[in-house]
Structures are given as structure tokens and as C-alpha cells.
């Protein structure tokens, strides 16, 4: 028996932000694939300066892309060639893509680790579904272009030895706006 004036609270059910369907549901996957196809077409037709989609990378799967990148003219990276690996989960665009440098040439930059991981807030906590592959590419070009000195992050050796292979599993600390 409840004390006088106290009413029994209704059991609150958890708020569902997504439809009751699982992520494996065809309509959700179709939506993600439609968005990726739209972005793929945009990247092919109107790539950011110095960026080119590696066509071979999307032949087997639309969820993993390689973007070839050339350092911008007039910067420390002018003429250098890099590759960015984009991996998309079934939750894209609500979940950011996994983005990292790959291949033989990883840029030496204060926000790029020697294993290719990139410390850039829009790849984690500042991600928004309004962002796209093109906007990520532009941010990375801008980050490299504004660099004043080629050097690795101060904790590069420790980070590379201890980090997860997926850079999205890193809890980044964004504290340096100088480059």
C-alpha cells in the first residue's frame, strides 16, 4: 500500500529513436546504400581539388573506398601522393565513416599518426549526418595545407604501440588548433 498522496508511477519504456527494424533490414541498408551511391557519384563527378576516387576500390563493395590524394600546390605536401581509406558502417550517415591514411606514404603531420590514424574532430564527436565524403576530404586537405612544420604527434610511438586498429575506438583529446 502506498502512502497517502503518492501515486504509482507508470513504468517508463525506453525511447526508441530508430524504427523497430534491425540494422540488417533491407530498407535501412537500401537507404545507406542509396546515400553512398549518391556520394560516390558526387566524388566521381566533382572531386575536391587533388582528390580522385580509386575506382578499383569500390568494385567489390560500396562500403569501403580508397581516395587518392595529392598534396596541394604551395604547401609542405605539394606533389606528394597519399591514400585515404574510408570504411562505412551500416549506420552511415548517422555514424561517421572510419577514415585513415593507408599505403606506403603516410603524411608527416602533427595530427596524423604513423599508422595512418587522423586526429580530426569531424571524424568522431563532431560528426554530423549533414557531412559527406567530400566535406571530410576538404577538411583533411585543409588540415594538411595549413601545416607549418612536418612532424609527428608527440605521443606517436606510444599511441601506435597501444591503439586499436580502428581509429574510431580512440578517445581523442582535441587541444591543438595551431595546425
Image: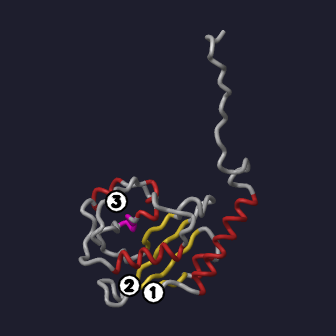
Horizontally, residue 79 falls left or right of residue 31, namely left
Mark yes or no: residue 160 visible: no
Q: Quadrant of residue 36?
A: bottom right
Q: Which residue is mark 3?
A: 174
Horizontally, residue 116 falls left or right of residue 60, namely left
Q: Quadrant of residue 113?
A: bottom left
Label 2 vs 3, first from the N-terminus: 2
Q: Range of the magenta residues?
A: 115-119
* Residue depicted at 30% across the width and 67% down the height: 177
Kind of element beneath mark 2: loop
* Residue depicted at 55% across the width and 81% down the height: 54
Q: How far apart in space, not on screen, are marks 2 and 3 (Cα)?
A: 24 Å
* Residue depicted at 41% across the width and 54% down the height: 170
Kind of element beneath mark 1: loop
Q: Is residue 6 magenta?
A: no
Label for residue 50?
1
The picture places residue 175, in percent across and down from the top left corner, at 30, 60
Kind of element beneath mark 3: loop
Amino acid at each position: 500500500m502506498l502512502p497517502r498522496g503518492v501515486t504509482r508511477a507508470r513504468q517508463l519504456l525506453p525511447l526508441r529513436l530508430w524504427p523497430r527494424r534491425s540494422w540488417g533490414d533491407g530498407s535501412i541498408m537500401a537507404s545507406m546504400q542509396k546515400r553512398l551511391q549518391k556520394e560516390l557519384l558526387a566524388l566521381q563527378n566533382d572531386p575536391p581539388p587533388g582528390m580522385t576516387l580509386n575506382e578499383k576500390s569500390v568494385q567489390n563493395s560500396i562500403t569501403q573506398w580508397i581516395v587518392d590524394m595529392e598534396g596541394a600546390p604551395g604547401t609542405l605536401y605539394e606533389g606528394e601522393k597519399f591514400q585515404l581509406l574510408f570504411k562505412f558502417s551500416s549506420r552511415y550517415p548517422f555514424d561517421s565513416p572510419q577514415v585513415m591514411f593507408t599505403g606506403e606514404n603516410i603524411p608527416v603531420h602533427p595530427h596524423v599518426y604513423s599508422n595512418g590514424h587522423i586526429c580530426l574532430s569531424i571524424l568522431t564527436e563532431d560528426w554530423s549526418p549533414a557531412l559527406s565524403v567530400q566535406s571530410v576530404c576538404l577538411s583533411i586537405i585543409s588540415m594538411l595545407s595549413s601545416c607549418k612544420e612536418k612532424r609527428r604527434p608527440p605521443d606517436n610511438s606510444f599511441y601506435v604501440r597501444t591503439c586499436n586498429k580502428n581509429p574510431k575506438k580512440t578517445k581523442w583529446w582535441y587541444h591543438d588548433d595551431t595546425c
